[in-house]
Image (spheres, helix red, strand yellow):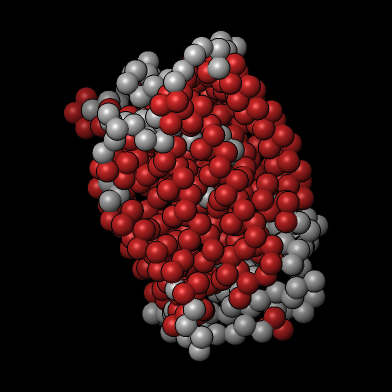
Amino acid sequence: MSTDASSATPGSPRLRRTLTLSDLILYGVIVIQPVAPMSVFGVLSERGRGHVVTAILIAMVAMLFTGISYGRMARAYPSAGSAFTYVAQEINPAVGFITGWSMVMDYMLNPLICTVWCAGQAAQFAPGVAPWIWKIFFAIVFTLLNIRGIKTSARINTGMAILMGMVVVGIFVASARYIFGTHHDAAYFSRPFYDPATFTFAGLFGCTSIAVLTYIGFDGISTLSEEAENPRRNILLATVLTCVVIGVLSAFEVYAAQLIWPASEPFPDVNTAYSYVAGRAWAPLFPIVGFTLLLANFGSGLGAQIGAARLLYGMGRSNALPKSFFGEVDEKHRIPRNNVFVVGAVALLGAFVLEIVAGYKTYSLGTNGLSWDTFVKILNGGEAYGLGAEMLNFGALIAFMGVNAAALLRYYVRSKEKKLGFLIPPALGFIICLALWLNLSRPAIIVGSIWMAAGIAFGIWKTNGFRNPMSFELPPEE
C-alpha cells in the first residue's frame, strides 16, 4: 500500500479544495435534513409512547461517538474514499473493500429512495402528472445539478437551508402561539421528556433505535475531504457540529409537536403525522410542511449523489474498482463525472425495480399474473420507499462499525499513550452500531447479505483474491 501523494499521475486533474467549514456543515445538515424527524415523528411517538425528545437526545449522543471517529480518521487520511480508506489502511485492504462496498449500497439507496419520495409528493401537488414521470424528472435533475461542480451544489445547499429554516421558524412561531394560548400546568411542559403514566424502558429503547436513523448521512461529510479547506481540522468540526445542530433542532421540533399533539391521541395518518401537528397549530402550515419535506428530500437526494460519486472515485483511484472509469476526474468541473452518471442511472432504474419487487407481494403477481394496468399501478406506487429505507441501514451500520474499529486501533491500541478519550468514543460507537445492526429486519439482512456476497465475489476477482495491491494515495493539502 502506498500513501505517497507522488504516486498520482503527474498533471492529472484533481478535485478542487473550495469548501469552507460552513459549506461542510450546510452539506451535512441538508443531507441529514433540518426537518429530519418530521417524516418519522408519528412512528417515533407511537413506539416511544410520547418520549420522542428523550430518544432524539440519546440518539444524538450515540451518533456523536461515531462522528468523532469519522473526524479523527479524516485527520489521518483526508481522502474521498472515506470509510473505505480508513479501514483499508488501519485494518486490512480486504476489510476496507468490504466496508467500501457496504457504503456503496447505503449511498446508492439514499438518492434512490429520495427520488421515489419526491416523485410521490410531487404527484400530490400536480396529480395530472404520473409519479413515474416525476421519478425520471428528479433522477435527471439530481444528475444535471451535480455535474455542474461542487461549488454549485454548495450554493444550492445554502439556498435550501435558508428556505427550510424559514419554514421551521414559522412552525416554531405557530406552535408557541398555540401552546401558550391556553393555560397549562408545569407537568404539561415536562411530559415530552418523561411521562410516568406511559414511560417504559422498552418503549424508550425501541424509539431510540429508530431515532438514531435520523442522523444517518453525517458520514457523507468525510467523502468531501479532498474538496475541503484544511480537512484535518474542518472535517472533524463539521461532522460533530452537524450532529449537534441536527440533534438540538430535532429535539425542539418534536418537543413542540408532542405538546401540540399528545401521545394519547392517535394520528389520522402516522406517516404524515407532523403535517397534522403543524395544521393544528396553524391550518395553512399543513400544505407548507408537505412542500418543505419535498424540498428536504430533494436536498438529501442531491447531496447523497455527491457522496456516492466521490466514494466510487476513491475506490476507483485505489484500483478497488476499474480505475480508468471510476477514478477519472472531469477537467472542467473537477468532479468524478462518470460516477455521477452511474449513481443517477442506478437511482432511476432502481426506483422502478424496487417498485416491481415491492409490488410482487402487494399485487400477488405470482398468482394473478401481470396486466398492463397493474404494471402501471406498480410504477406509480411509492412502496419502494419503505423497502429501500429498510435496506439502507444495513450498509451504513457496517461502515460505522468499521470506522469506529479503525479509530480505536489507530489512536488507542497502537498509541503509546492510552488515553480514555481515544478509547471510549470508538468503543461505545462500535457497540451501539453493532446492537442496531443485529436488530435490523429480516428482509434488510437478506438483501444486504446478497449485496455483500456479490461485492466480495467481485473484489476477489478484481484483486486476485485481494493479493493485488491497492493504491491509497493521499492528495496534497493546498
Look at 34% across and 18% down and name the residue there. Answer: 265
Observer able to see residue 175: yes
Look at 39% across and 21% down and name the residue there. Answer: 262
Where is residue 452 shown, x and y percent of the image?
A: 36, 61
Extreme residue in the left direction? 367
Where is residue 143 shown, x and y percent of the image?
A: 64, 44
Q: Nearer the viewer, residue 117 or 377?
A: 117
Observer able to see residue 43: no
Q: Nearer the viewer, residue 429 or 458?
A: 429
Quarter of the image where the C terminus is located: bottom right
Where is residue 437 shown, x and y percent of the image?
A: 33, 55
Left or right: 165, with 106 as reference point: right
Quarter of the image where the N terminus is located: bottom right
Look at 76% across and 56% down and name the residue there. Answer: 20
Q: Which image quadrant for residue 8?
A: bottom right
Q: Which image quadrant for residue 454?
A: bottom left
Look at 35% across and 63% down and name the residue there. Answer: 431
Q: Is residue 79 above or below residue 388?
A: below
